[in-house]
Amino acid sequence: MGWSPTTDEIDQDRKGEIMENMLTSDIAKFGARERAILVELLEAWGRDGLPSDFYDEDVVPMFNMNSGYVFLTNADYQTAIMEDGKLVSHYFLPYGGLEGTLSELVEEFEKYGDSWHSDDVEAFNDIKSLDS
């Protein structure tokens, strides 16, 4: 019998295909709305710079064709989005998978922080310290 892929290998291939079909940096695939958001991102970058904790190596625009979000990302897969007319970092908490800007995470913590896993609380505190 010849080689056949394992279930894990098939799952990895599917994940790659899904990500390929969901995210694009090809501006030709952006619609008019997404190109307008990209212009806002670039104008904010030019006016105010990137968020202080966002590395400026290999920065590219990205469009999530599933959610409609347009954002900047870099070589470290950090994410910057628009919030109140400025570029801000978008974060991901490691345990529960909660994601958002600092202001969104603060709001969630005020509501539900007492039920967060300690790893998420630690990550949240690290994020807050970056903003200080």
Image (tube, rainbow, N blue to C red):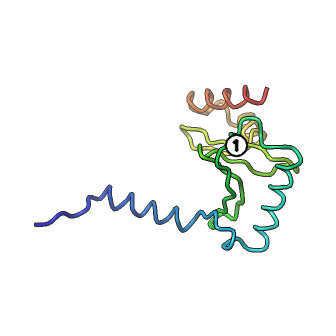
Q: Nearer the viewer, residue 90 or 46?
A: 46
Q: Quadrant of residue 90?
A: top right
Circle count: 1
Q: Residue at x 67, y 63 (%)?
A: 63
Q: Residue at x 77, y 68 (%)?
A: 35
Q: Residue at x 75, y 38 (%)?
A: 102
Q: Residue at x 63, y 29 (%)?
A: 121
Where is residue 5 shown, x and y percent of the image? Answer: 26, 62
- Pointer 1: residues within 10 angstroms few (<14), some, or many (20+)? some
Where is residue 125 shown, x and y percent of the image? Answer: 68, 27
Q: In which quadrant of the rendered image does the C terminus lie? A: top right
Left/right placement of residue 42 relative to residue 61 reads right
The residue to which callout 1 is attached is 56
Q: Amino acid at mark 1?
A: Asp
Q: In which quadrant of the rendered image does the N terminus lie? A: bottom left
Where is residue 16 shown, x and y percent of the image? Answer: 45, 61
Q: Secondary structure at mark 1?
A: loop
